[in-house]
Image (tube, rainbow, N blue to C red):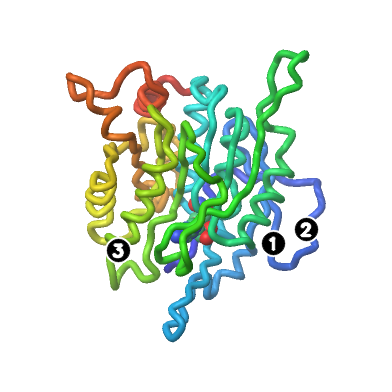
Amino acid sequence: MSYPHTCYFQEVPSTSEQPTDEDLVQTVFRVGSYDIVIRKGHPLCCDELLTCDHESTTTTDRTGILMWPGSTVLAHALLALGGGGVLAGRTVLELGSGTGFCGVVASIFAKEVVVTDQSSEMRDIARLNLKANQRLQWRSRDASMSRCCTTSVLGLAWPGVGYSGSPFDESGHRQFDLLIASDVLYVDEPRCGGLDDVDIVSFFEVVHRKLADGGLALVAYANRERRGAQVIEECSVRCGLRCLVLPLPGFIRPDVLHAEGAASLNSVLMFGFVHIRVAATESGGISPDTFCSGALSLLRNISSLAA
Ligand SMILES: C[S@@+](CC[C@H](N)C(=O)[O-])C[C@H]1O[C@@H](n2cnc3c(N)ncnc32)[C@H](O)[C@@H]1O
């Protein structure tokens, strides 16, 4: 697996202290008009982030310590949704969060954000990052209500390349309006193998189960594996989801997409998933009075983005 070094958001000089933990560096990224503080792995800690002990068939996945291209794409989608007002009062679940960067962006706009990962190390880092960005979290404008975004970090795992244990879900039976996941579908060495159907079905079973009626799942996929997009579409349909491809120019400005060095950002595929029953109106479209319908039309319409 080749590891990323770039986040694609402008880095802002930070005046705050660096963490004392040698493994972590702190960077401030300008995301839209928000300066987001993120602790993540030092680029030099990239070796052996995904290892498999073939004798015990145990996987250790520390890939989440870095930020991946899909997280940039997903953050742009969240900015479009948040700027369009559709996240107000909504609940968001992040799967395979790594540093929790996208969960932080969601917390600027939504009523509740639950960030999850299989790795307790990543969950600790995501907790640090949510705390460091508390000042940005959504707050009710009604002073009498003292309401603000509720955030939590929990364990959740499906069987797959990044996790070899038994599946678990500390969020219980809860369902969410918006599910987000970036760069969570991969294989160790894309040139040697494709996405495994069984793993991908496990992931989409989680998506199907955690998605509220009328909800939307946004999955940013790095698109490194041969036939990856096809496997994703086929497995999601088998799990009762409808798969839609959301072209990046619908929600990311051309200057970002055409910036120097944005090649791996442009290879990311953004998928939207809705329950098939929601997409089963008489005309074959998505019921207009659902959360997913409003969200999808914002993501397909760059002109709705603020300059
Ligand atoms: C490549 S990193 C992506 C991190 C972050 N979403 C990003 O885009 O920067 C993959 C993350 O998904 C988590 N992950 C991988 N497989 C998982 C599984 N089967 N269940 C739960 N989390 C998983 C890993 O622990 C890791 O944090």
Return the x and y of residue 280 as percentages of the image width and height. Answer: 23, 26
Count neighbours of disc 2 (C-alpha within 10 A) and say few if under 14, some if 14 to 19, many if 20 or more.
Answer: few
Give the residue at x 64% y 62%: 121
The quarter of the displayed image where residue 111 is located: top right
Contact, mark 3 vs mark 1 (Cβ under 8 Å): no
Per the image, the residue denoted by label 2 is 19
Per the image, the residue denoted by label 3 is 196
Cα distance in 3D space between marks 2 and 3: 38 Å
Contact, mark 2 vs mark 1 (Cβ under 8 Å): yes
How many labels, in total? Answer: 3
Return the x and y of residue 208 as percentages of the image width and height. Answer: 37, 42
**132 above or below 18?**
above
Per the image, the residue denoted by label 1 is 24
- Earlier in the chain: of badge 3 and badge 1, it is 1
Give the residue at x 72% y 37%: 134
Return the x and y of residue 170 as percentages of the image width and height. Answer: 57, 50
Indicate the amino acid at tag 1: Leu
The residue nearer to you, when weighing 58 against 76, is 58
Q: Nearer the viewer, mark 2 or mark 3?
A: 3
For the question of whether residue 5 can be seen, the reply is: no
Count neighbours of disc 1 (C-alpha within 10 A) and say few if under 14, some if 14 to 19, many if 20 or more.
Answer: some
Left or right: 285 as drawn, with respect to 157: left
Q: Is mark 3 within 8 Å of ligand 1?
A: no
The residue nearer to you, when weighing 32 against 255, is 32
Indicate the amino acid at tag 3: Asp
**157 above or below 274?**
below
